[in-house]
Image: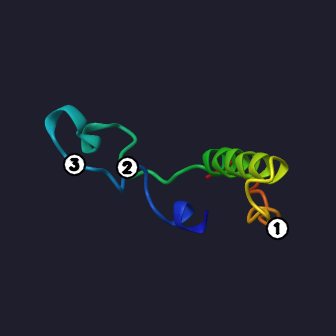
Amino acid sequence: MRSLSERSKYEMTVNDKANNNPKAREDFDKKISNSTISNYTRNIKVFFSYLYQEQVIRTNPMKNVKNVKPGGK
């Protein structure tokens, strides 16, 4: 999660072909918002909680991960 807050949108892409040119986007090189990171964190936590409840995993690695406060950048 820390890595997401330190990098920009579309910093990691597969290629820069014309049909997938992230540099042409208006929001290219802007920071990823805390709301987006909060959503990612929440979704990952729900996924691991499900795996834990279904006894697919023995411990939930997201149990002690704190939520990012949404809002702002």
Mark nearer the N terminus (3 vs 1): 3
Helix, strand or loop for disc 3: loop
Q: Horizontal and vertical percent for residue 65? A: 77, 65
Q: Position of residue 10 (x, y in %)?
A: 37, 49
State if disc 1 and disc 3 touch (CB < 8 Å): no
Percent position (x, y) of residue 33?
59, 49
Q: Specify whether 29 is left or right of 18.
A: right
The mark found on residue 44 in the picture is none
Task: Please tell me how crowded label 3 is: few (under 14), some (14-19), or many (20+) other residues with Cα within 10 Å.
Answer: few
Q: Is residue 19 above or below residue 32?
A: above
Q: Which is more N-terminal, label 2 or label 1? A: 2
Left or right: 52 in relation to 26: right
For image coordinates 19% across by 46% down, the residue present is 16
Say which of marks 1 and 2 sits in front.
1
Q: Which quadrant does the N terminus fall into?
A: bottom right
Residue situated in front as seen by the camera: 59 or 4: 59
Residue pointed to by mark 2: 10
Q: Residues within 10 Å of mark 1 (few under 14, many from 20)?
A: few
Q: Amino acid at mark 1?
A: Asn
Give the residue number, with chain letter if any, for mark 1. 64
Amino acid under disc 3: Asn
The amino acid on which the numbered mark 2 sits, given as a three-letter code, is Tyr
**Is disc 2 placed on a helix, strand or loop?**
loop
Q: CA distance from mark 3 to mark 1?
A: 35 Å
Relative to 3, 58 lies left or right? right
Q: Residue furthest front?
A: 55
Q: Nearer the viewer, residue 21 or 65?
A: 65
Read off the residue under disc 3: 15
At 35% from the left and 56% from the top, the residue drawn is 12
Work out how far the residue at label 3 is from the one at label 2, CA to CA, in angstroms.
Answer: 11 Å
Mark positioned earlier in the residue sequence (3 or 2) = 2
